[in-house]
Image (spheres, grey):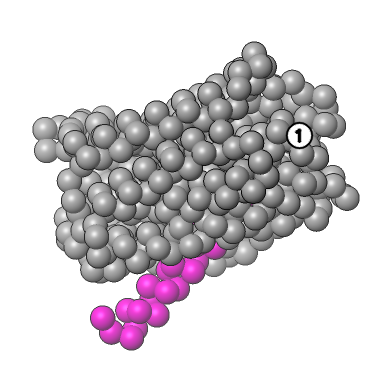
């Protein structure tokens, strides 16, 4: 690879990754804000659950609409639209004074978040050579850990002293910088405007046609299981720490420690994905996630809780990196945005149900260990989908 290409890839990774970081910061802040709103607005467990779920409903709608749109108007244009949508929404949410208004705004923010993530991975996948594609997409996903880390820092230092509204305003400010950068970002070299003329229903039909139906079923099951378990566990993580008897500030502190483990999770997955393959990384890291989730649910001491939480972050986010690398590789260019968007959209249904399940089970005094066993089972189903239906795409040229 020439020096020019390397610089171009690094710039693409930096610009796309910066937006990914801000997305993660918003989602991460939401998990801490939910815990703060519970104290300030006197929310019960079911109301807390609906905040996380309404965000995922927006993400499901956004992933579908903007995934289809990216095959029609291009990847870069959708980047700009989705980023503007969620950054403006983040700032506006600071003005919410009732739960209803806050949830309406969270739906709009979710649309932007859900639309941007699969389109970002599609653009990067189509813009780098096959031998580097998996590694670069996992490194793109690693910016998510940076966003969560910033969210944990902002929550720990800002929310207790200045309130959750200040944290939401902070989350809106840097997004405009990424918006500025993306105006000069070239679109995918594989996107062809003439492909946009294909009707939407035809594109959806292609995704479910004989050559791609097996991959589509595998992705939909995998995305559902991963998103269901991730949002069920991580949006509730600070609140679960409170339920286990820790103060709000201590809970934020411990979640910050756990969040640090996300970075080595991504980097090891990035190193392995071009050496051992996509399926190996997905299966290994998902199994690690299941074991860590079980240990976290059963933990009865602080040291065990933090250790299992660290491994949970390490394995789960490494699996996410592999998932985003693997998904666009299942489809041809003409329907890649549609296929990735549809899989992500279906997965977000899991993101709706996961937080709701936790909220309703907690309200019924169900043991936390039982809740986490449910997530273990969901992750194992995702492993089986990859093992039985997935095909290896390492070093495969995109068509």
Q: Residue at x 48, y 62 (%)?
A: 264
Prevailing secondary structure of the magenta residues: helix
Residue nearest the viewer, comparing 263 with 377: 377
Residue 367: quarter of image: top right
Outermost residue toward the top in this view: 364
Task: Write the start and end of the magenta stretch as one range.
Answer: 1-26
Horizontal arrangement in the rendering, residue 393 relative to residue 138 (left or right): left
Where is residue 328 shown, x and y percent of the image? Answer: 29, 49
Q: Is residue 12 magenta?
A: yes
Residue nearest the viewer, comparing 162 with 291: 291
Horizontal arrangement in the rendering, residue 52 relative to residue 199 (left or right): right
- Which residue position holds label 1? 245
Residue 157: quarter of image: bottom right
Residue nearest the viewer, comparing 290 with 202: 290
Q: Quadrant of the N terminus?
A: bottom left
Where is residue 352 shown, x and y percent of the image? Answer: 52, 27
Where is residue 324 shown, x and y percent of the image? Answer: 37, 50
Q: Residue at x 24, y 31 (%)?
A: 217
Q: Is residue 202 magenta?
A: no
Residue nearest the viewer, comparing 331 with 348: 348
The crowding category of the residue bearing disc 1, from other C-alpha atoms within 10 Å (few below 14, some 14 to 19, many at least 20), is few
Residue 358 appears in the picture as rendered: yes
Where is residue 59 shown, x and y percent of the image? Answer: 50, 36
Q: Residue at x 69, y 38 (%)?
A: 241
């Amino acid at each position: 690879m020439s020096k020019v290409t390397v610089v171009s890839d690094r710039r693409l990774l930096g610009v796309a990754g910066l937006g990914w970081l801000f997305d993660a910061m918003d989602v991460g802040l939401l998990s801490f804000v939910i815990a703060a709103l519970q104290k300030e607005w006197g929310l019960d467990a079911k109301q807390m659950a609906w905040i996380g779920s309404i965000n995922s409903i927006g993400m499901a709608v956004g992933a579908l609409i903007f995934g289809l749109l990216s095959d029609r108007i291009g990847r870069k244009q959708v980047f700009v639209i989705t980023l503007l949508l969620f950054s403006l929404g983040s700032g506006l949410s600071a003005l919410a004074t009732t739960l209803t208004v806050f949830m309406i705004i969270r739906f709009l923010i979710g649309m932007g978040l859900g639309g941007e993530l699969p389109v970002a991975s599609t653009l990067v996948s189509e813009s780098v050579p096959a031998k580097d594609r998996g590694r670069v997409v996992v490194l793109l996903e690693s910016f998510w850990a940076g966003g969560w880390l910033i969210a944990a820092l902002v929550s720990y230092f800002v929310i207790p002293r200045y309130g959750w509204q200040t944290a939401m305003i902070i989350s809106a400010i840097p997004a405009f910088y990424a918006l500025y950068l993306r105006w000069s970002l070239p679109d995918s070299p594989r996107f062809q405007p003439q492909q946009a003329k294909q009707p939407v229903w035809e594109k959806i039909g292609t995704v479910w046609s004989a050559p791609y139906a097996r991959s589509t079923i595998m992705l939909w099951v995998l995305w559902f299981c991963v998103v269901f378990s991730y949002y069920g566990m991580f949006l509730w993580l600070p609140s679960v720490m409170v339920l286990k008897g820790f103060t709000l500030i201590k809970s934020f502190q411990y979640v910050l420690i756990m969040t640090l483990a996300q970075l080595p999770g991504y980097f090891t997955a990035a190193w392995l994905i071009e050496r051992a393959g996509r399926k190996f990384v997905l299966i290994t890291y998902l199994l690690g996630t299941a074991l860590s989730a079980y240990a976290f649910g059963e933990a009865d001491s602080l040291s065990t809780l933090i250790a299992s939480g660290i491994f949970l972050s390490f394995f789960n986010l490494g699996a996410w990196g592999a998932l985003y690398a693997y998904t666009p590789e299942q489809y041809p260019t003409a329907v890649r945005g549609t296929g990735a968007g549809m899989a992500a959209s279906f997965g977000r249904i899991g993101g709706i149900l996961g937080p709701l399940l936790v909220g309703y089970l907690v309200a019924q005094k169900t043991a936390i260990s039982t809740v986490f066993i449910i997530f273990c089972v969901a992750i194992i189903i995702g492993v089986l989908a990859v093992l039985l239906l997935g095909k290896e795409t390492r070093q495969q040229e995109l068509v």
